[in-house]
Amino acid sequence: MEASATLGTLLRTLLDHLDGAVEEAYRNQGLDYRPRYTPVMKVLRHEPATIRELATRAGLSHSAMSQTIAQMTRHGLVTAKPGQDARERIITLTPKAAAMLTALERQWRVTEAAARSLDTDLGMPLADVLRQAIDALDRRSFGDRIAQAATSLSDSQESR
């Protein structure tokens, strides 16, 4: 990777490396499964949940979780039934998804071991660095940081 790669490029490349390898490992195990399904499967293996509950537990937006649930529904992994009001849907695993759980749980353990290996090579847990970055952005958004940098840059150019 070039030293001039931007932050966005680096993040996309990292995600491509991680998700690509995990997705390939699932395929090698004969599983038609995407890494983005994992937070949903981990919750639903214990109990049904609403999309809102799933989004909260996974730390995703409601919209992102709805898209994931739509994909999982198309793949026959989950079903949705009406909840207590017309807007709420209760998501449950299908028998097809339940049959995959043993193989998935093994692959999750393997993936966690591989992540620990990467952490050792890095000298720090990657997940901790990512959480720290997200926490910092929750405190002060990247948009705010861009605006401040633009103002600072303009001020310094005007003072020349």
Image (cartoon, grey):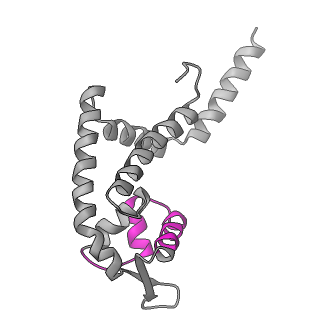
Q: Quadrant of the C terminus?
A: top right
- Indicate whether 136 appears above or below 160: below
Say if the magenta span includes residue 64: yes
In terms of depth relative to the viewer, which is nearer, 3 or 27?
27
Residue sitting at x 35%, y 54%: 28
Where in the figure is residue 77, as x and y percent of width and height? 40, 75
Q: How many marks?
A: 0
Q: Is residue 160 visible?
A: yes
In terms of depth relative to the viewer, which is nearer, 66 or 27?
27
Say if the magenta span includes residue 45: no
Where in the figure is residue 15, as x and y percent of width and height? 46, 42
Task: Read off the magenta span.
Answer: 46-72
Q: Is residue 57 visible?
A: no
The quarter of the picture where residue 37 lies is bottom left
- Indicate whether 120 appears above or below 55: above
Residue sitting at x 49%, y 42%: 16
The quarter of the picture where residue 145 lies is top right
The overriding secondary structure of the stretch rendered in magenta is helix
In terms of depth relative to the viewer, which is nearer, 140 or 31?
31
The quarter of the picture where residue 104 lies is bottom left
- In the rendered view, does 55 fall on the left or right side of 102? right
Residue sitting at x 43%, y 43%: 134
- Indicate whether 37 appears above or below 149: below
Where in the figure is residue 147, as x and y percent of width and height? 66, 35
- In the rendered view, does 90 fall on the left or right side of 102? right
